[in-house]
Image: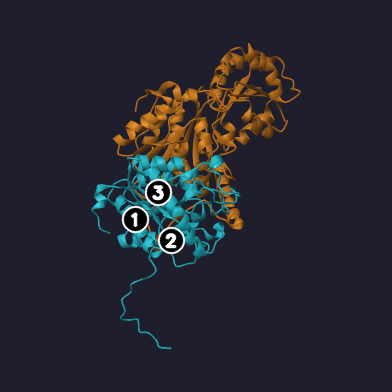
Chain colours: A orange, B cyan
């Protein structure tokens, strides 16, 4: 199939349909709404389920019900909507049901902006809702990668009976890029063994998240954790650019990583040995890749579109073995490649280890820029 | 003692197939057991057990899935109508019902129930109204009567501060998408028989694809009302019935011709 021009939000909607999506439930929220609109036309056309819910609470619980019947199901939303969905996500995780969530992240906190951000990192990567569980979280850096990731996420979610999250910032949802659509898969006809279907007596199935016996709930938590260890073993993904002979490593995911790549290329052209590590799976995090960078290189620059949420994870992994600096834009502002290039040039000119917390040092540098 | 020969006797009353033959966790005198039985009898009589999926809610009936002998899912607090929507839309040929209390359905879940009724979602809702939060120990609910003492309205519900009971049946009957809305009471045998007919009509509504159906069942909570079961039944009749009149609040024309 040839490449076509696709808007990010519509592209992932079509990719999900081609992956055999059977039921979509959603609620309008910028900058994700085009996905809902696309689904509203395309799903009924194919005889599949589309419903605009009364709220994100409604949408995630409709997904919960649909997932319990064993159909391929998903929702998409943006940050304030994701916050509302946390309740349902926790229940779905506890019931061990597969589903896909696409979170098109915007600037917060609160109603915030409708501009691109990576401010959902903590609430997805370190969360989901209450309780001990992790959703599988991946972050694409462009429309094609979003298409491929959403297309593949249903299999991953079903393999681990877990929540698969594709977390992209609003710019990818809104941008138009060439992308090649994967082939249309057949919609599943069979019902998974664990799903409710209408069965009585010995065929009765119960899908619930409550178990008042702490000893039983502890066993269940352990089962979730052991399954998570399998996810950690199998699903770590990352991309490396110009890392072979790099002396400075930038670590950035999604669009922040993509913008950093432009800066890396310009710096390389000027002879600065800098490379990029772009984590693709944020949960499970590419811990080993970061450890190797920390062991070999003197300087790491973490670039994010938030105030250093992934930075905290990197600092934990690096454990002071190398100097880690930070650069971010917050509240829905995107960094220009020139800003990151200036950071690379600054570090190249003075690679000595920093004194202080990288966030504090960044705040000193960024405050005049923000207030100018 | 004379041994009775029951071989040739007609069985007129028996344990419903759709109820598991175990003791429930409900308090003595609580009417949940009656409501469970009525639903199970209707499911049996209509032959629906092998294609029914129940949606339990949060409250005393959270564990109702242990007592009904067919497929069940369990929803977050108040979200049962949304979860039931996901089940029904995914498997439209199955019979899907929620079983919710008053705190669940008309307080935390008010948005979900109104939206489901407005959509004319082809599901059935069994709604138990006992005028308080039973599971958490008897707090004030939206359905608590004016002046009624609960653990969170210790001096009696003050309508100046906390407003008035929400009349769920009257409210939902205003929705065009609702096809059958009825309020019944479980305080005496006559009313229990009337309740069963209403439950039957609600499931008939769904089987006929007519849209949203809901039966509100006025119920007792002797434990949290601090009454004997007999006094609780009397209190329901004397205090709740005047505030919550039993009756049919919405009946689709196709149902009014139906004899059950």
Q: Earlier in the sequence, mark 2 or mark 1?
A: 2
The CA span between labels 2 and 3 is: 37 Å
Q: Which residue is mark 2?
A: B187
Q: Which residue is mark 3?
A: A69
Circles 3 and 1: CB atoms closer than 8 Å: no
Is disc 3 in the same subunit as disc 1? no
The CA span between labels 3 and 1 is: 28 Å
Question: Residue at (38%, 60%) from the top-left corner?
Answer: B191
Q: Is residue B49 visible?
A: no
Residue A272, position in %: x, y? 63, 16
Question: Residue at (76%, 23%) from the top-left corner?
Answer: A355
Q: Is residue A44 left or right of residue A250?
A: left
Asked where in the image residue A118 lies, by quadrant, the reply is top right
Q: Secondary structure at mark 3?
A: loop
Circles 2 and 1: CB atoms closer than 8 Å: no
Return the chain for callout 1: B
Q: Residues within 10 Å of mark 1 (few under 14, many from 20)?
A: many
Return the chain for callout 3: A
Q: Which residue is mark 1?
A: B198
Image depth: mark 3 or mark 1 in front? 1
Question: Residue at (68%, 34%) from the top-left corner?
Answer: A316
Residue B241, position in %: x, y? 43, 54
């Amino acid at each position: 199939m040839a490449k076509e021009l696709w808007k990010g939000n519509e592209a992932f909607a079509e990719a999900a349909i081609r992956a055999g999506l059977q039921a979509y439930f959603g609620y309008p929220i910028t900058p994700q709404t085009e996905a809902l609109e696309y689904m509203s036309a395309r799903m009924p056309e194919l005889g599949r389920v589309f419903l605009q819910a009364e709220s994100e609470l409604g949408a995630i619980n409709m997904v919960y019900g649909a997932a319990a019947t064993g159909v391929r199901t998903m929702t998409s939303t943006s940050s304030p909507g994701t916050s509302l969905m946390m309740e349902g996500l926790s229940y779905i995780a506890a019931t061990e049901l597969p589903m896909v969530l696409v979170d098109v992240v915007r600037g917060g906190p609160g109603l915030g902006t409708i501009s691109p951000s990576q401010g959902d990192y903590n609430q997805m990567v370190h969360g989901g809702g209450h309780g001990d569980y992790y959703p599988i979280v991946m972050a694409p850096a462009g429309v094609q990668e979003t298409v491929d990731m959403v297309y593949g996420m249903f299999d991953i979610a079903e393999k681990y009976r877990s929540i698969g999250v594709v977390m992209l910032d609003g710019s990818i949802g809104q941008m138009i890029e060439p992308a090649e659509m994967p082939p249309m898969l057949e919609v599943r006809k069979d019902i998974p063994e664990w799903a409710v279907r209408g069965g009585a007596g010995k065929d009765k199935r119960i899908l619930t998240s409550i178990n008042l016996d702490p000893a039983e709930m502890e066993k269940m938590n352990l089962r979730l954790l052991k399954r998570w260890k399998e996810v950690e073993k199998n699903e770590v993904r990352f991309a490396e650019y110009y890392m072979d002979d790099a002396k400075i490593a930038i670590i950035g995911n999604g669009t922040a990583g993509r913008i950093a790549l432009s800066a890396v290329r310009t710096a390389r052209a000027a002879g600065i040995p800098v490379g990029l590590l772009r984590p693709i799976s944020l949960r499970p995090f590419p811990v080993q890749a970061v450890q190797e960078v920390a062991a070999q290189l003197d300087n790491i620059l973490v670039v994010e579109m938030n105030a250093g949420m992934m930075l905290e994870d990197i600092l934990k992994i690096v454990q002071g073995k190398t100097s880690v600096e930070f650069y971010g834009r917050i509240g829905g502002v995107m960094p220009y490649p020139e800003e990151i290039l200036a950071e690379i040039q600054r570090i190249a000119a003075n690679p000595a280890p920093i004194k202080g917390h990288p966030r504090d040092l960044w705040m000193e540098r960024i405050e005049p820029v923000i207030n100018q | 003692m004379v041994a009775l020969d029951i071989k040739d006797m007609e069985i007129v009353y028996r344990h419903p197939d759709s109820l598991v033959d175990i003791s429930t966790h409900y308090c003595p005198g609580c009417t949940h057991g009656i409501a469970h039985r009525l639903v199970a009898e209707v499911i049996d009589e209509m032959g629906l057990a092998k294609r029914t999926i129940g949606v339990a809610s949060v409250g005393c009936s959270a564990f109702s899935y242990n007592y009904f002998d067919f497929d069940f899912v369990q929803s977050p607090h108040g979200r049962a109508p949304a979860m039931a929507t996901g089940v029904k839309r995914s498997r439209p040929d199955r019979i899907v019902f929620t079983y919710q209390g008053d705190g669940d359905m008309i307080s935390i879940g008010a948005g979900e129930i109104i939206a489901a009724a407005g959509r004319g979602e082809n599901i059935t809702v069994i709604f138990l109204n006992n005028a308080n939060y039973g599971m958490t120990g008897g707090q004030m609910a939206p359905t608590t009567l004016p002046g009624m003492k609960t653990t969170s309205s210790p001096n009696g519900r003050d309508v100046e501060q906390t407003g008035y009971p929400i009349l769920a049946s009257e409210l939902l009957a205003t929705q065009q998408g609702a096809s059958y809305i009825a309020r019944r009471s479980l305080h005496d045998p006559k009313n229990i028989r009337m309740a069963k007919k209403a439950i039957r009509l609600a499931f008939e509504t769904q089987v006929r694809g007519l849209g949203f159906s809901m039966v509100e069942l006025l119920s007792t909570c002797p434990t949290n009302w601090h009454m004997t079961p007999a006094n609780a039944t009397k209190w329901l009749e004397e205090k709740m019935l005047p505030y919550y009149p039993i009756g049919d609040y919405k009946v689709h024309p196709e149902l009014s011709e139906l004899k059950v």
